[in-house]
Amino acid sequence: MDQEREPGRGWHDMGGAAFAGAVDPASHDYALWEKRVDALMVLCTAKGLFTVDGLRRAIEDLGPGAFESMSYYERWIASVARNLIEAGVFTVEELNARMEAIGARGATYGAASLARGDG
Amino acid sequence: MPHDHDHDHDHDEHRHEGMSASGHPYRADQDAPLTHWQRMEIAVRELLAEKGVATPAEIAAQIERMDARSPALGARVVARAWTDPAFRALLLADGSAACRAEGIEVDALKLVAVENDAQAHNVIVCTLCSCYPRTLLGLPPDWYKSRAYRTRLVREPRRVLAEFGLTLPDAVTVRVHDSTADMRYLVVPRRPEGTEGWGAARLASIVTRDCMIGVAVPHI
Amino acid sequence: MAETPPPAVAPPAVALPAAPPPYPDPAAPPPRFAPGAVVRVRRGAAPGHIRTPWYLRGRLGRVERVCGWFANPEELAYRRPGLPRRALYRVRFSMAELWGEGSRDTVDAEIFEHWLEAADAPRP
């Protein structure tokens, strides 16, 4: 089965699709920022701001390239941000302004997230 | 403002601060170049705090809660099922209730335990995303989320298992479970020969995460 | 798809204890299908958030158990409540049915009631 020739099949709907190659048994330990993304998802869904179904749907809407071009938690934060905008928790404008400001704090994750002393 | 705990990069039970030569806390990911998506994570986290939606303390607590979950919890459940027939029956009827009976808080997890026996070997996948019994076993390994695993396990499970070093006789039926909805699956492996008289901790020590996903079996 | 041999339906599931499903909804109608029933997964290529995998659509399987009643994820994904709850079934498919192979291996998946029809329903 070729996903590209099957309109109506989501890119994420992978069961049985053609794939040549072994399963790579390597795995990585989760970075702090990834654990934070995971925590944000759990907290926001527990607070009823969106559902895990909404998380999945927004990931699916990222399109087929997302699987190769983004890591698992990169897709998650892209989806969490979209879901929170949909929920009206913050606006695109607010998110934009904050992301720009963060980028100006420093070139590393540490500098950008530690600047306000939140460890 | 509360500090997040430093998190070591391995999944040890205990966390310790990694200190650089100058005596300051060192975390490798803190020094990596900031990415677009990390900027987004910081921004979302800060906006949620400012709007009173989720505090840094709540986020830190949730990270700790998730870190406390690991395959060791599932191994305890399996080891008890091996030695306690009433517990085994409960586990097979209602996996989440059995976890709670073992003192493990699994929140909203709807766990279905599937038992390996002489006739059948079970193995778990989520072809649509990467659903996993994370509130029991912790976060899944990367390979479980890979395209290779998600495409191939439902199509050629024996070849995939062979790549993990597990070859099953033809007489054993392989049962693949695709977690498409609200259920999450735990494979209860067969108790190996030669473990008679073993205590709970020793039995649990041979039940690995891969055994509970179904790509491995316990070895003594 | 090329002509394949008659589909091989998975053998009847092991007899299960006659206990109610773990996740009931007293307000919901009884399940349409019982354990052991042969069902066909509907086809459909609409967009949206769908939890019925492509590789199972149009396939014959056998109900292994009724999982319970759950809100519809297709609606939940778009901030709607997805009510009333619908019956969710664990359905067992044989490898022969899915891929035309002779092994007795199986795939179980959870499928919502609105994606299932009785096996003798006319194919579209």
Image: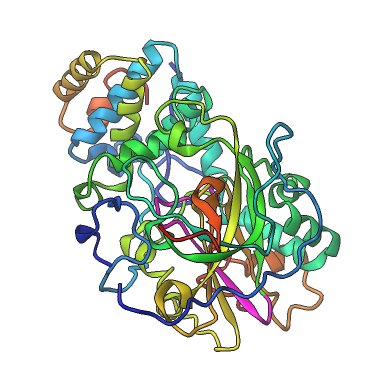
Query: Observer-nearest residue: B138 or B114?
Result: B114
Query: Observer-nearest residue: B148 or C123?
Result: C123
Quarter of the figure with residue A52: top left
In the image, taking residue B149 as reference, residue C9 lies left or right, namely: right
Is residue B17 positioned above or below B203 on the image? above
Q: Which residue is at a point 60% across and 57% down the rendered structure image?
A: C90
Residue C91: in sight, yes or no? yes
In the image, taking residue B188 as reference, residue A85 lies left or right, namely: left
The x and y percentages for residue B78 are 69, 62
Q: Which residues are magenta?
A: B117-134
The x and y percentages for residue B94 are 73, 51
Quarter of the figure with residue B41: top left
Is residue A81 positioned above or below B156 on the image? above
The x and y percentages for residue C75 are 45, 32
The x and y percentages for residue B51 are 39, 10
Is residue C82 positioned above or below A34 on the image? above
Query: Observer-nearest residue: A78 or B155?
Result: B155
Q: Which residue is at a point 33% across and 42% down the rendered structure image?
A: A73
Residue B5: in sight, yes or no? no
Q: Is residue C99 magenta?
A: no
